[in-house]
Amino acid sequence: MKRLFYILVAVSTVFTTASVYAQDDNTERRSPQATRGQRETVERNSGLPDLTARAQDMNERMTQEIGNARWMRVIYREIDLTKEENAPLYYPTRPMNGQKNLFFLIFQLMSEGKVAAYEYLDGYEAFDDAHRADMKTILDRAYIYYDEIPGRPGEQPSYILNESDIPSEDVLSYYVKEAWYFDQHNSVFDVKTLAICPILTTGGDFGEQRMPLFWLPYENIRPYITNAYIMTSNLNNAKTFTIDDYFRRRMFDGEIIKTENLMNRTLQQYYPEPDSLRIAQEQIETQLKEFQSALYWKPDTTTQVAVTAKEKKTATKSARATKSSTKETKTKAPKAQSSSSGSAPVRSVRRR
């Protein structure tokens, strides 16, 4: 009996030990997954919060509707970031004291799947799902190292990028697509920024190469750049303007490279010579200003000048007449009445 008892105790001890090891093994298998999930949460949280309902509503309110425009002209500009006027979009090239340049901010939003970019087409742009740019393709084209994190079913995967691998210092220019329009219902003449396209500049055996990366609708990134403050002056170091203010107030300096036309040609194709190209750009700028000035009624300045001169002349005459009459009144003194002979003499009394 004792032998049987010892055998049962030994068997129970073996089973207990095996179950304990199995639990420890399962715990060890689950712990790396939990740690990975925590690490993904930390790495994917770049300080750019998701849009709230209030932010989305405000973005819709700030959207300029151009569907009712009776007149509109779409213009493409190129912003050279090497110019001092456009430097606020370029510096700092690396995150510094919480400050990020425009391309670094855009790339973070795209890697986290918060904004969508669209393919760069040499012609008309299409901002639909069929022409949506693949983030992985963009990273491969630009030779950027990344770690891919698969998303949930029905969601796009996200990508983890090292800050040193984002080529923010190599993006030296932008294409800006804007619409100059006149809304007859509201009597408003304004400019709306439609989309921007970063241009990556790389050096190779064949010299400097420029590669437009993608088109990004401005409405998609505006909720995020309304809180991105930048320094716009070397004399005033206070960061009082945001990137949205920079575009909305048109504080940049961009040359016109194309206007939307039926044949889809650039200005350089129409005017291959540099001098003729510059004259054409100035003519377009002048046309926009003249169209804006011709929209509103202006009074006839010549008539106003004539009326003002006549009123001034009449006022001068009346002032002279008033002055002469006052002078004549002062010169005329009242005559003293002569004393009659029968009147008593007047004595003067002096005090002693």
Image (cartoon, rainbow, N blue to C red):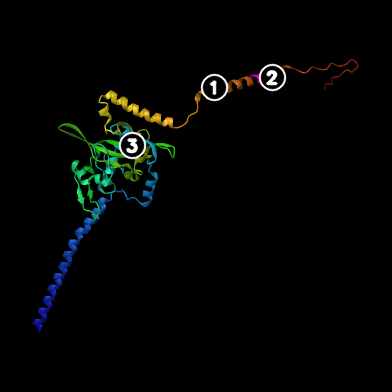
Snapshot quadrant of residue 314: top right
Across and down, in percent, residue 198 comes to 26, 38
Across and down, in percent, residue 50 comes to 32, 50
Asked whether the viewer can see residue 101, the reply is no
Across and down, in percent, residue 44 comes to 26, 51
Q: Would you say the residues marked 3 and 2 are in contact, meaning their CB atoms lie under 8 Å apart?
A: no
Asked whether the viewer can see residue 320, the reply is yes
Disc 1 marks a residue whose amino acid type is: Ala
Q: Residue at x 25, y 29 (%)?
A: 269
Question: Does the magenta portion include 28?
Answer: no
Residue beneath disc 2: 325
How many tags in the picture? 3
Disc 2 marks a residue whose amino acid type is: Ser
Q: Nearer the viewer, residue 320 or 234?
A: 320
Q: Main secondary structure of the magenta part?
A: helix
Across and down, in percent, residue 229 comes to 35, 41
Q: Residue at x 36, y 49 (%)?
A: 56
Q: Would you say the residues marked 1 and 3 are in contact, meaning their CB atoms lie under 8 Å apart?
A: no
Q: Nearer the viewer, residue 197 or 346?
A: 197
Residue beneath disc 3: 178
Badge 1 element: helix
Q: Which residues are magenta?
A: 320-324
Q: CA distance from mark 1 to mark 2?
A: 29 Å
Return the residue found at the far right. Answer: 342
Disc 3 marks a residue whose amino acid type is: Glu
Q: Earlier in the sequence, mark 1 or mark 2?
A: 1
Q: Which mark is residue 306?
A: 1
